[in-house]
Image: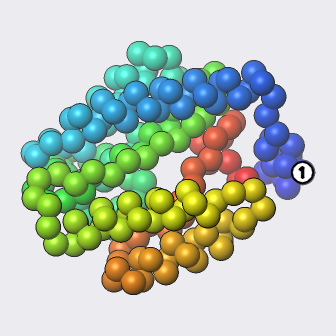
């Protein structure tokens, strides 16, 4: 997409904002349902099915659901029926919900089962990073500068090689807007 078009699409009118808000509500409800089902022994596809059920029933037409159960290199991964939730691992769910083709994304990560070791360190670090990102992100601040601070925290906690790069999700006409 051309830079000029991307810049124009970054500006939304009241109707578009309402559509994005409705998409956000769908994403919120779907992720709540998916998280309720993120239990020991459940497959990634079973978790995703619960989210898709909510999304389609609420009127989403092109939703996307990614599920990653456990420590593996898959990021924003389509769910697999062969991957099941194990004790002491994290489950990350990413929802891209739409309303009249306007999107909002939401993601959550939970620790299932035993709360110790690297998984507990990762969850505690994610909480710290989330708070830091919320504090630092404001108009005029470059996202790369926030990322540098986030990476500093991951490095201090010895998790820099395990983190997912990036911390924002887009809203609008594309699942991931360029701005």
- Residue at the image point whose x is 19% and y is 59% from the top: 89
- The scheme the figure's colours follow is rainbow
Circle 1 packing at 10 Å, graded few (<14), some (14-19), many (20+), is: few
Query: Which quarter of the figure has residue 148?
Result: bottom right
- Residue at the image point whose x is 65% and y is 73% from the top: 145
From the top left corner, tell me how far across and down residue 86 is, in percent.
12, 55
Would you say residue 40 is visible in this rendering? yes
- Residue at the image point whose x is 24% and y is 44% from the top: 44
Local SS, label 1: helix
Q: Does 139 appear above or below 143?
A: above
- Residue at numbered disc 1: 4
Q: How many marks?
A: 1
- 151 or 40: nearer the eye? 151
From the top left corner, tell me how far across and down residue 163 is, in percent.
40, 70
Q: Does 64 appear above or below 67?
A: above
Q: Does 157 appear above or below 16?
A: below
From the top left corner, tell me how far across and down residue 93 is, in percent.
36, 46
Would you say residue 63 is visible in this rendering? no
From the top left corner, tell me how far across and down residue 149 is, in percent.
55, 75
**Left or right of residue 172, residue 90 in this image:** left
Q: Does 161 appear above or below 26?
A: below
Residue at far front of view: 135
Residue at far right of view: 4
- Residue at the image point whose x is 57% and y is 60% from the top: 135
- 79 or 119: nearer the eye? 119
């Amino acid at each position: 997409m051309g830079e000029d078009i991307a810049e124009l699409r970054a500006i939304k009118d009241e109707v578009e904002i309402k559509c994005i808000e409705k998409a956000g509500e769908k994403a919120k409800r779907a992720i709540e349902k998916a998280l309720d089902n993120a239990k020991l022994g459940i497959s990634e596809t079973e978790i995703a099915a619960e989210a898709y059920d909510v999304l389609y029933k609420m009127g989403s037409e092109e939703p996307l659901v990614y599920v990653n159960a456990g420590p593996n290199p898959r990021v924003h991964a389509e769910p697999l029926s062969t991957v099941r939730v194990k004790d002491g691992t994290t489950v990350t769910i990413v929802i891209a919900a739409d309303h009249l083709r306007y999107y909002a994304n939401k993601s959550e990560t939970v620790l299932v089962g035993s709360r110790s070791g690297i998984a507990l360190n990762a969850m505690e670090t994610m909480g710290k990073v989330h708070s830091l990102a919320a504090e630092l992100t404001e108009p005029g601040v470059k996202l790369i500068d926030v990322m540098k601070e986030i990476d500093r925290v991951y490095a201090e906690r010895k998790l820099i090689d395990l983190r997912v790069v990036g911390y924002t999700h887009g809203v609008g006409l594309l699942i991931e807007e360029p701005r």
